[in-house]
Image (cartoon, rainbow, N blue to C red):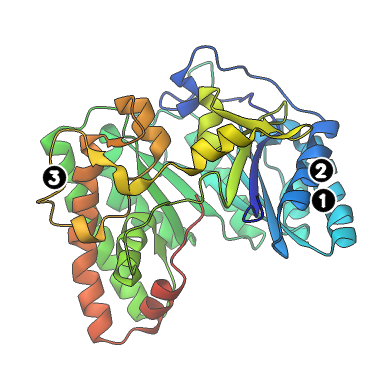
């Protein structure tokens, strides 16, 4: 598969937190285990063999990948060595809950140019469900570690998972995090929980307030990324509706601690479909079936797409694994996904018209390079 250029590897599926909404809880049979150096080397060799790209990427995921930070360091070292021989450049990424970061590790990550996605769901609040197994909230510690990352000259992506109980804090937390120096926010809803009409209305109110700050910062030449807005803005440059949103089973794959290959990292928690193994190669039939998944076939859970006001600029059906988790069908969107996409589009439309009329340079650049890795 020569289009492959990125792998997300669970160097461990174990985690030191017990967050209520984590997608790995979907299946009680989900195995928490750590990988080893032999698998890590096979992941690197597999990626190099199966990609014609001159730059390839490896992201560490879990679980909490820093529970196996030594393994991560060893595999990055191996990747650099093998990359030189293969005349390919590596990029490295890490999605972490930040609780295990320290000064020495942050410096190492910076020296090795490992980009970071930090799971930080706004400021600490009683309603925040990111907790340790004891029930102790992780928010204060995570915020402290996130600031440590900033102080060392790294601008992380803030992975901000929102659910109805914390919506009321969305704007105030965003404003405060901006003041602290964070500028990239991957704000994403939990679709697996119930949202009421009042929740949706509150989300729109909070996003409208955020959009005003966002607009003013772009006018001041301060690049800022807010995923719901940037995702909605990017469809202005789409020539046609997407057939794939995230490179699923084409540009990227997920690999579990044993070396099994999946269409993406989310399917690992589901245990399948397995598309092969890094030691034995592809299961060609399973790979073919996954590559035939087509977002153009996705429809809403309980309404027709025909009259949807954002039909022609729909971002393409969302996450197929979320569809499967919520609706038991990769081609059926949960209704809340469609509701919130319409909110995002309404808010982003006003921003787009204003910035286009003002010939804003940052807006033009966003349309040229819209992708945000989350």
Is 280 or 114 nearer to us in this picture?
A: 280
> Mark 3, residues whose alpha carbon is within 10 Å: few (<14), some, or many (≥20)?
few
Residue at the spot of label 2: 75
Q: Position of residue 194 (x, y in %)?
A: 23, 27
Question: What residue is pinned by disc 1?
Answer: 79
- Is the residue 364 above or below the residue 327 in the image? below
Give the CA separation, mark 1 to mark 3: 47 Å
Label 1 with label 2: CB-CB less than 8 Å = yes
**Labels 3 and 2: the sequence-earlier one:** 2
Check residue 101 in the rendering and tell me which mark sits there, or answer none.
Answer: none
Left/right of residue 65 with respect to residue 323 in the rendered view: right
Q: Residue at x 13, y 38 (%)?
A: 303
Provide residue 344's location: percent of width, then percent of height.
24, 55
**Residue depicted at 82% across the width and 50% down the height:** 79
Sort mark 2 into few (<14), some (14-19) or many (20+) by Cα contacts within 10 Å: many
- The disc label shown at residue 201, or none: 3
Q: Is residue 137 visible?
A: yes
Q: Does 177 sit left or right of 332 as displayed?
A: right
Extreme residue in the top direction: 29
Q: Secondary structure at mark 2?
A: helix
Q: Determine the image quadrant of residue 61.
A: top right
């Amino acid at each position: 598969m020569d289009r492959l250029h990125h792998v997300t590897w669970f160097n461990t599926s174990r985690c030191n937190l017990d967050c209520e909404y984590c997608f790995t809880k979907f299946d009680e049979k989900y195995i928490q285990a750590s990988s080893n150096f032999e698998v890590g080397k096979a992941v690197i060799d597999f990626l190099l063999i199966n990609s014609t790209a001159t730059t390839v990427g490896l992201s560490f995921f879990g679980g909490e990948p820093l529970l196996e930070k030594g393994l991560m360091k060893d595999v990055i070292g191996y990747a650099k060595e093998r990359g030189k021989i293969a005349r390919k450049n590596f990029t490295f990424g890490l999605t972490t809950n930040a609780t295990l970061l320290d000064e020495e590790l942050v410096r190492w990550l910076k020296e090795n140019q490992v980009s970071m996605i930090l799971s930080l769901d706004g400021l600490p609040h009683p309603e925040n469900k990111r907790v340790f197994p004891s029930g102790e909230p992780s928010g204060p510690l995570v915020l402290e570690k996130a600031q440590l990352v900033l102080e060392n000259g790294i601008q992380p992506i803030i992975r901000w998972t929102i659910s109805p109980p914390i919506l009321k804090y969305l704007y105030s937390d965003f404003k405060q995090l901006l003041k602290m120096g964070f500028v990239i926010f991957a704000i994403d809803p939990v679709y697996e929980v119930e949202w009421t009409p009042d929740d949706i209305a509150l989300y729109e109110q909070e996003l409208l307030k955020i959009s005003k700050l966002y607009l003013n910062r772009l006018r001041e030449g301060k690049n800022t990324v807010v995923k719901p807005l940037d995702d909605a803005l990017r469809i202005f440059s789409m020539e046609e509706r997407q057939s794939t949103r995230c490179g699923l089973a084409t540009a990227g794959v997920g690999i579990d601690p044993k070396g099994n290959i999946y269409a993406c990292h989310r399917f690992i928690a589901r245990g399948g479909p397995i598309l092969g193994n890094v030691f034995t190669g592809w299961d060609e039939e399973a790979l073919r079936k996954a590559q035939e998944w087509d977002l153009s076939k996705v429809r809403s859970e309980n309404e027709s797409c025909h009259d949807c006001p954002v039909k022609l600029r729909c971002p393409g059906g969302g996450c197929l694994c979320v569809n499967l988790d919520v609706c038991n069908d990769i081609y059926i969107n949960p209704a809340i996904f469609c509701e919130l996409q319409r909110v995002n589009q309404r808010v982003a439309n006003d921003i787009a018209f204003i910035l286009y009329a003002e010939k804003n340079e940052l807006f033009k650049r966003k349309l040229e390079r819209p992708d945000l890795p989350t």
